[in-house]
Image (spheres, coloured by chain):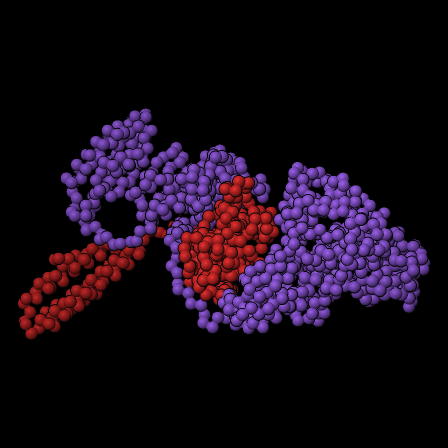
Chain colours: A red, B purple
């Protein structure tokens, strides 16, 4: 029996497969239902019991061998019969990829700022770009006929002499969202308020009649200037790196008192200079009173910064108009 | 506002450089926006006497001059046409450096030279080369009495100065003058303030016999002081005064006018000098008119001054627009001998209104509208009178007029130490706060435990509340010295607002489909706005920045079209942009969002234009079609999980509305030719504009995901082609199928659209593939056939559709 098995094994090894016909012949001779291997297994019943294990093992070995040889040969033939390599099969030919879209650099800078303030525990709130005088000026402690109103060149949509009809303006800052928040919600509250703002300014490389700000507001029982500065320093470090050089200096905004501005030191070819990155301060008691919050119980801080300017610093953009021209050759440099 | 460093030093001893001074000012609240060095010490520049002038042998325009420079006589080549023997001229000797930089920023050093073969040992200078004026017509000719060799600095009585440009905030009118700036510096450095006004006293007495002063409008003029100087001689001011004024950018006029300007910039009180002899009837009245007044100001401009503006009038009528500018009819001229000095307090809002309506801001109106010291008028007039006598001769008419209908109420404010520390986060002591306030001239008295009663100085109209005092303490203490909080502020983390999450989700979705984000102008031109919406829907600004940007966008498509034009003009072929932004419409009250009568929504625009694919080896180029943008909009609808709920209604052959709960949430369009023409775009443009505010409010895509088991049974597909009139749209048939089917119909797709003579001229065939699925069993043809029958019947009834066999 064992001899017989060895013989078949030899036959398998010697079988020459060089084309599809040979392959089929091989299959018929060895692997088909009437093939030599099946016939061999049919004789198993006649093998004496004590040899069964040894014979069975040998038979299986032959079966695996035959199948292996068949599979290998089939693969070889397939490779060999593959279509001839044509000019259009050249894998080095160029393609037109489907490129991913991208976010505008303003969105990217703003996203970064939002992420930082989220980590610092600020929510994000929204408000309208077309505002009335109350939210944009009066509630923010800009008295009528006050020179402070000249600090912001305003686009008017409606100007009225009627006491009962408020002036409508394109908001000159995101600060009116503070008023909306405080009107609708009792402290404590802590939010940033990003959005588009408008100033009636000629378009130049440095100024544009629309730009973007991020406003921040934190009101609670014991908020102080130390915490404000700490928060701003954390922002500056997360935005510009922990080695950022900064300073704060007094300033003036009608809706905060005391008011400050923060500068960061910006290196350039000529050495460097202080660049103003934001304005801030403690919420003025008059603002609290306009929204019925008791300034003796609550204190708060607010800050505001320009997104366009931060984006321009971030990406080395020297002309603000680029941000609103949407030249595709500009946009596609911002991949994410 | 310009401050001269030299001038400043008259009121405070400083051992700080101009740079250090600027830093101190910036950190205590007067932000220095720039510094400029002016003038020069003119090292190596001397007075020269021209001894001989000869023609240059090799150059027509040059002359050879022998110049006595005191120690020596040198040869200098000079090109100026006006050089002449006997002149005294400024000479830059060899080794000196010119005071002004050249074009490349470097400074010219005078060296021994040869000009066309002739030696030149120095340079004769023009006024412009010395930085003294713009005059470069010829060399500067000095006073003939000057001695050759005298250092030029001494001869001209000039010195170098640094101009500090301060960006003054509106709350600090007190710092709009040199004494005020010095006061802040004094508080920061501890060096005492030397205020020349503290010692001034006016001699009592009346000048009523000379002039009668009255105030008719007492709400707008709170005080009017008059003083007189008689017998003056009007001439040029002395060098020191001219230098002070030119340093800060003013043009000297004559000794009297210059004195008034000097005092304005010294103490902040605007003054006006009238030619007394031109005052009709020797009376002054301060009043308003209830109609517009034509008036010629001393800059020789006739102005239409609106009714209600405050005027200074004499017996004949207006002689000055109060607080803004004097009149030509009463101005001081060379022949003036008697002077009436006006020193008044006008109500800030009144001056501001006049100045704004005339679009005329002067140094005077700038200060009045911010609020000047209401108690300085008499002293300022006295100082002016004294200086005028010193510079122009004459004598002060003893006494003064002081009409003072509205007296200033001194302001006292309580300050709690605990409040300072609570607001600032400091641990200051009472004496620290007191010291700072006293240095700023606030008088303080202890008013109980931990409290100060502070008397606010009259020059600080901005301070009236405790918080204002806290700011004073804070800014002089220096905010940079506030310690970090001992425990870092611990903030409870916030979750993002739902709108924020929603908009971010949409933004990322658009990017994933290959759209690049753009940001476009909110303001369009009238023509552009008209192309997109009716006038009644538009909202415009009353004071546009330019005609290009007058009207708020009602749609995002306008900005998109402008950016397309921009890129097409630069040969960009494949444009695929998106934008998220606010759009504005004028609406009825009920449709308002934030502001009554205004609907302000956030929209998403996705738009494509040009070539989807360029010519390449795989095939010819392919232009975008409306189906490309439709596919992306459908993809968004699917992303928001509202496929089944959205209705699609064709507006025209080129426009399809998407409705949810009866509200339009998106519009798909091929923009029409007229719109494209308005925006000067020459290619087909396809857009989808989506109303995100509406979608958000309708809860589209906002529900939480919960798992439903996937179907266990296979679906059953059934193909059916219908022949219908050409006018019937596929979308209508789809809706009809949907309506007639039960909920086992899971999807409808179109796999063939055919038109041809064999089915009739006015007919077309649309072939649908309907997919049915029952979650509870395997569907067979027996189950599906009756469903299809019902659909066929329904389409036949509604559209006359015939099943194509």
Q: Is residue A232 left or right of residue A70?
A: right
Q: How many marks?
A: 0
Q: Is residue A228 left or right of residue B274?
A: left
In the image, B251 versus A162, the foreground residue is A162
x and y, in percent, of residue B44 in the image = 83, 66
In the image, residue B691 above or below residue A241: above
Residue B524 appearing in the image: no
The residue that appears at 23% across and 36% down in the rendered structure is B740
The residue that appears at 84% across and 61% down in the rendered structure is B156
x and y, in percent, of residue B217 in the image = 66, 45
In the image, B363 versus B323, the foreground residue is B323
Residue B647 appearing in the image: yes
Q: Is residue B776 left or right of residue B537?
A: left
The residue that appears at 72% across and 44% down in the rendered structure is B285
In the image, residue B720 above or below residue A332: above
In the image, B91 versus A131, the foreground residue is A131
In the picture, residue B461 is in which quadrant? Answer: bottom right
Quadrant, the N terminus of chain B: bottom right
In the image, B248 versus B190, the foreground residue is B190
x and y, in percent, of residue B20 in the image = 66, 68
């Amino acid at each position: 029996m064992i001899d017989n098995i060895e013989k078949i094994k030899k036959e398998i090894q010697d079988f020459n497969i060089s084309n599809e016909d040979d392959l089929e012949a091989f299959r018929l001779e060895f692997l088909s239902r009437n093939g030599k291997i099946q016939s061999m297994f049919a004789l198993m019943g006649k093998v004496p019991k004590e040899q069964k294990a040894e014979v069975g093992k040998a038979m299986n070995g032959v079966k695996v061998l035959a199948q292996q040889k068949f599979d290998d040969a089939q693969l070889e033939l397939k490779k060999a019969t593959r279509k001839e390599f044509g000019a259009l099969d050249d894998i080095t030919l160029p393609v037109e990829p489907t490129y991913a879209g991208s976010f505008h650099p303003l969105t990217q800078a703003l996203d970064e700022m939002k992420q930082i303030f989220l980590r610092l525990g600020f929510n994000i709130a929204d408000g309208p770009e077309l505002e009335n005088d109350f939210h944009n000026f009066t509630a923010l402690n800009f008295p009528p006929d006050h020179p402070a109103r000249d600090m912001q060149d305003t686009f008017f949509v409606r100007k009225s002499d009627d006491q009962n009809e408020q002036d409508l303006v394109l908001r000159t800052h995101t600060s009116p969202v503070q008023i909306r928040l405080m009107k609708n919600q009792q402290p404590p509250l802590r939010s940033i308020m990003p959005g588009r703002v408008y100033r009636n300014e000629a378009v130049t490389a440095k100024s544009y009649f629309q730009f973007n700000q991020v406003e921040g507001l934190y009101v609670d029982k014991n908020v102080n200037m130390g915490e404000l500065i700490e928060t701003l320093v954390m922002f500056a470090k997360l935005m510009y790196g922990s080695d950022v050089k900064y300073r704060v200096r007094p300033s003036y905004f009608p809706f905060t008192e005391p008011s400050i501005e923060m500068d960061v030191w910006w290196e350039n070819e000529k050495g460097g200079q202080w660049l103003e990155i934001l304005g801030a301060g403690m919420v003025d008691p008059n603002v609290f009173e306009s929204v019925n919050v008791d300034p003796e119980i609550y204190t708060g801080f607010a800050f505001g910064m320009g997104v366009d300017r931060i984006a321009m610093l971030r990406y080395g953009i020297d002309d603000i108009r680029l941000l609103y021209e949407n030249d595709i050759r500009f946009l596609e440099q911002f991949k994410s | 506002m310009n401050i001269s460093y030299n001038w400043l030093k008259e009121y405070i001893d400083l051992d700080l450089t101009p740079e250090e001074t600027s830093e101190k000012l910036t950190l205590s609240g007067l932000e220095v926006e720039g510094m400029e060095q002016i003038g020069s010490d003119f090292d190596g520049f001397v007075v020269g006497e021209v001894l001989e002038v000869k023609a240059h042998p090799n150059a027509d325009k040059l002359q050879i001059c022998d110049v006595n420079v005191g120690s020596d006589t040198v040869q200098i080549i000079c090109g100026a046409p006006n050089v002449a023997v006997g002149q005294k001229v400024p000479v830059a000797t060899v080794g000196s450096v010119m005071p002004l930089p050249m074009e490349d920023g470097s400074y010219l050093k005078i060296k021994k030279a040869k000009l066309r073969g002739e030696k030149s040992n120095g340079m004769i200078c023009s006024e412009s080369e010395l930085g003294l004026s713009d005059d470069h017509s010829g060399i500067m000719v000095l006073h003939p009495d000057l001695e050759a060799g005298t250092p030029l600095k001494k001869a001209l009585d000039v010195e170098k100065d640094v101009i500090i440009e301060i960006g003054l905030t509106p709350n600090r009118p007190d710092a709009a003058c040199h004494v005020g700036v010095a006061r802040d510096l004094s508080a920061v450095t501890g060096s005492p303030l030397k205020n020349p006004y503290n010692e001034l006293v006016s001699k009592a007495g009346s000048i009523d016999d000379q002039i009668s002063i009255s105030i008719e409008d007492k709400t707008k003029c709170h005080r009017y002081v008059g003083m007189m100087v008689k017998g003056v001689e009007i001439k040029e001011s002395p060098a020191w005064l001219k230098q002070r004024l030119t340093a800060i950018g003013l043009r000297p006029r004559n000794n009297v006018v210059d004195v008034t300007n000097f005092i304005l910039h010294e103490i902040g009180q605007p003054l006006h000098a009238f030619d007394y002899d031109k005052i009709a009837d020797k009376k002054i009245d301060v009043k308003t008119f209830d109609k517009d007044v034509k008036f010629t100001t001393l800059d020789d401009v006739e102005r239409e001054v609106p009714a209600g503006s405050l005027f200074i009038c004499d017996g004949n009528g207006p002689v000055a627009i109060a607080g803004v500018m004097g009149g030509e009819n009463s101005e001081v001229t060379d022949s003036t001998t008697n002077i009436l000095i006006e020193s008044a307090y006008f109500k800030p809002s009144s001056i501001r209104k006049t100045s704004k309506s005339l679009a005329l801001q002067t140094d005077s109106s700038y200060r009045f509208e911010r609020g000047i010291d209401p108690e300085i008028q008499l002293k300022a007039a006295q100082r002016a009178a004294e200086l005028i006598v010193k510079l122009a001769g004459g004598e002060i008419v003893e006494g003064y007029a002081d009409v003072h209908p509205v007296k200033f109420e001194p302001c006292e404010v309580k300050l709690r130490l605990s409040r300072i520390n609570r607001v600032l986060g400091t641990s200051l002591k009472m004496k620290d706060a007191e010291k700072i306030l006293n240095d700023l001239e606030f008088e303080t008295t202890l008013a109980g435990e931990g409290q100060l009663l502070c008397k606010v100085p009259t020059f600080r109209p901005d301070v009236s509340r405790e918080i204002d005092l806290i700011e004073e303490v804070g800014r002089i203490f220096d905010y940079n010295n506030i310690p970090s909080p001992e425990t870092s502020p611990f903030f409870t983390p916030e979750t993002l607002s739902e709108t924020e999450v929603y908009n971010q989700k949409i933004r990322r979705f658009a990017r994933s489909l290959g759209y690049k984000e753009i940001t476009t102008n909110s303001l369009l031109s009238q023509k552009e706005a008209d192309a997109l919406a009716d006038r009644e829907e538009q909202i415009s600004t009353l004071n546009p920045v330019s005609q290009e940007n007058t009207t708020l966008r009602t749609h995002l498509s306008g900005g998109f079209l402008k950016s397309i034009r921009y890129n097409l003009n630069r040969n960009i072929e494949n444009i695929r942009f998106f934008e998220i932004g606010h759009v504005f419409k004028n609406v009825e009250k009920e449709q308002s969002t934030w502001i009554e009568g205004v609907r302000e929504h956030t929209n998403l625009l996705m738009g494509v234009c040009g070539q989807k694919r360029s010519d390449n080896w795989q095939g010819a180029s392919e232009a975008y079609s409306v189906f490309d943008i439709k596919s992306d909009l459908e993809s968004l609808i699917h992303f928001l999980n509202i496929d089944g709920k959205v209705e699609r209604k064709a507006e025209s052959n080129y426009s399809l509305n998407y409705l949810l709960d009866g509200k339009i949430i998106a519009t798909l369009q091929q923009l029409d030719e007229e719109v494209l023409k308005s925006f000067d775009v020459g290619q087909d443009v396809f857009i989808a504009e989506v109303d995100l505010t509406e979608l958000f409010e309708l809860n589209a895509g906002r529900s939480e995901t919960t798992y439903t088991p996937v179907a266990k049974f296979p679906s059953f597909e059934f193909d059916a082609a219908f022949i219908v009139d050409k006018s019937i749209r596929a979308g209508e048939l789809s809706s009809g199928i949907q309506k007639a089917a039960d909920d086992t119909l899971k999807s409808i797709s179109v796999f063939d659209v055919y038109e041809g003579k064999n089915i009739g001229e006015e007919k077309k065939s649309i072939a649908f593939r309907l997919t049915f699925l029952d979650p509870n069993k395997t569907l067979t043809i027996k189950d599906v056939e009756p469903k299809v029958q019902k659909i066929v019947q329904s389409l036949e009834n509604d559209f006359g559709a015939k099943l194509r066999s």
